[in-house]
Amino acid sequence: MPGSGHPGPATDRLAAAGARFAESSGWENTSDFAPPGAAIEFRLTYSRPDWFEHHAAKHRSVRRDHHPPGLPLLSVQGPNSRALLGELATADLSNDAFPYLTAQEIDLHRARALAVRMSFVGELGWELFVPTEFAVGVYERLVEVGSAHGLAHAGMATLESTRIEAGRLDHGLDIENSDSPLEAGLKFAIDFDEPGGFVGWDALLAQYEQGPYTSRLVQFLLTDPEPLLYGEEPILLDGEAVGYLRSGTYEHTLGGAMGFGYVEHGDGVSADLVRDGEFEILVAGERVPARASLRAMYDPKNERVRM
């Protein structure tokens, strides 16, 4: 049931679909959806809770809904998203007509919506900004035609698990204003040839030319498929603490808990160190071996979003 946050235009429909809500920035946010008639206790534990298999199914469906103020956002994600939206939209949604990381205004079931082809979950998908007065109608139509395409409701818990798996960073968790974008692996987003430069240009260029960075954001996957991660668990390298996880959750595609954390090393965090180092994550007092990578372990070439 909705709690203390401000409801969105489709909150009552989402509640009827089994939504569990949590307040975020003053608004009701869909954390997850329970199956009909299920009595699920959402509690934190490092072992597998009663909602584990249910969440696994949502993770695989990769579909989420979120409603910020002004223009509600309906996010349709997953391999069948193009076919599903094709039943509501008159626009050509093919790769040639609607490439990745572009936006268009389209007609969408009696509404004029801004469709953005992007994905925080690492799959083919669109984020749809729909005027408030049309949002409920578009949502109901998506649900109506979606059953033929495997549509499932999923909330922020699924968004979190899929985005970590796909190597997407959360501002406020994995990156914030004291982190260097170079250390976070965001060199692709920096243009050192920007006319006139930018705030921090000198410091970033000096860090880039110095290499290797003494701190780098690394993705970790526990080799034991049983424990869970939530973030803030210590990172160990050769038995010594070298950082902590900024975020963590269970990844049902790769079959283990994953997280992002910065590794600190005075001699530099090189690719060789990340590849060959003996990493462990301290989970509830137990050391659990972990694979480490500077690239996303799921779809490292980012091909699925361009299907």
Image (cartoon, rainbow, N blue to C red):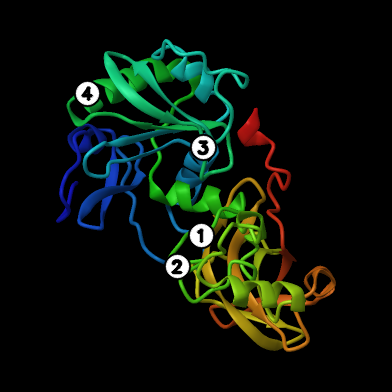
Name, please, the residue furthest toward the front.
Answer: 196
Q: Residue at x 29, y 29 (%)?
A: 130
Residue where numbered disc 2 is placed: 45
Tell me which label, 4 or 3, sits earlier in the chain: 3
Q: Is residue 118 visible?
A: yes
Q: Secondary structure at mark 2?
A: loop
Q: Is residue 68 above or below residue 71?
A: below
Residue 23 coordinates in the image, percent (x, y)? 24, 56
Marks 1 and 4 close (CB-CB < 8 Å): no
- Choose mark 1 or mark 4, whichever is in front: 4
Q: Can you tell which of label 2 and label 3 is closer to the viewer?
A: 3
Q: Nearer the viewer, mark 2 or mark 4?
A: 4
> Which residue is tagged 1?
48
Q: CA distance from mark 2 to mark 4?
A: 40 Å
**What's the CA distance linking mark 2 and mark 3?**
33 Å
Q: Amino acid at mark 2?
A: Thr
Report the amino acid beneath label 4. Phe
The first of marks 3 and 1 along the sequence is 1
User: Which is nearer the eye, 242 or 191?
Assistant: 191
User: Where residue 306 appears, x then y in whole percent?
Assistant: 64, 31
